[in-house]
Image (cartoon, rainbow, N blue to C red):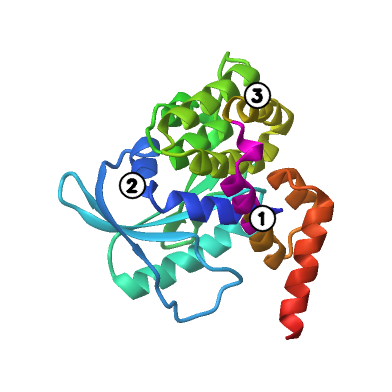
Amino acid sequence: MANEYDKIIKENLQSVILRLISKTTDVEAVEGEILYPELHYTLEREADFIERIKTSDGQTFIFHLEFQTASDKGMLERMFAYAGLIYQTYRLPLRQLVFYIGKAPVNKPTALRMPKFEYHYELINLQQIPYETFLQSDIPEEVLLAILCNFGQSRAEVVVEQIFHKLRDINESDLRLMRHIRQLDMLSLLRNLQSVVLQNERKMALTLDINNDLRVQEAKREMAIAMLKEGINIEIISRITQLPPSVIDELQIKLQAKKKK
C-alpha cells in the first residue's frame, strides 16, 4: 500500500512544493527547481524530492523532502546518508524535512550526535497542522492534503464535505474532479475515513451524473490499467475506480495478451 500513497504524493506535490514549504516552515520560498541528481552511491530507495530554493530574502539552498506513511526505524540513518550525498553534489546549504502522514503516533529520533558534530533533520507531522491551512488553497493537489491534517473540534463528516465542495469549486472539469476524488479516496485510508469519503462521492455522482459520463468511464479504465501495471490488487483497484472486478479482470487479460505478442 505504501507504494500507492507514494505515487499519489509524488504526482501531486511537484506543483505545490514551494507552498508546502512556506506553510510548514519559517522559509518563504519564492522560486524553486526540482533536481534529479545522479547520486554517486546506491541507496535502498530514491529521494522523494530534492529542490533548489530561492527565498524572499535572496538566499539559495537545497530542500530535501521525504514523505512517510509508516514509522521507519532506519529513517535517521537514511536521511544522514542523503545529506552527505546531496551536499557533495551541490555544495549548497541543505535543509531536510520528513512529512509524516501515517495513522499511528510517531516518535523517532531526528538527531545524530557525534563527539565533534551534530546532525538533525526536521520531522513534520501533518496531523498537527490545522486542515484549514490547505483547505483554503485554490490548487486541488494542495486541498487534498487537508484530509491528512488536524480537524480540531470539527467532525470528520463536516471536514470531508468541505473538501468535496472546495474540490468541486476549483476543478476545471468533471473529469479532473473525478481524478482528485479518487486520490482523496486513497488518502482517506490513512485516516480511516474512506466510508465518509465514499458517502460524499455517491452524493456528488448523483449531482454530476459522473458514473454515466463516457469520458469518465474511459478515464477509470485507464486508471485501472495503470494500476494493474504497477501490480496493485484487483480488489483495491475496484474500490478506487468503482469498476466491477469482472471489468478489471478483462483488462488484465488484455494486458497479459499484449505482453505475449
Instruction: Give the residues drawn in magenta, as a range.
Output: 209-222
* Numbered tag placed on residue 39 in the rendering: none
Q: Earlier in the sequence, mark 3 or mark 2?
A: 2
Q: Relative to 209, is 95 on the left or the right?
A: left
Secondary element at image label 1: helix
Q: Quadrant of residue 234?
A: bottom right
Distance Cα–Cα, label 3 vs label 2 = 34 Å
Q: Quadrant of residue 95?
A: bottom left
92 or 210: nearer the viewer: 210
In the rendered structure, are the residues bearing label 2 and label 1 in contact, judged by CB atoms less than 8 Å apart? no
Q: Residue at x 63, y 60 (%)?
A: 74
Q: Residue furthest bottom?
A: 261
Was residue 219 drawn as part of the magenta stretch in this picture? yes
Residue under pointer 2: 18
In the rendered structure, are the residues bearing label 3 and label 2 in contact, judged by CB atoms less than 8 Å apart? no
Residue 166 in sight from this viewpoint: yes
Residue 250, percent across and down?
Answer: 80, 62
Residue 156, percent across and down?
Answer: 64, 21
213 or 261: nearer the viewer: 213
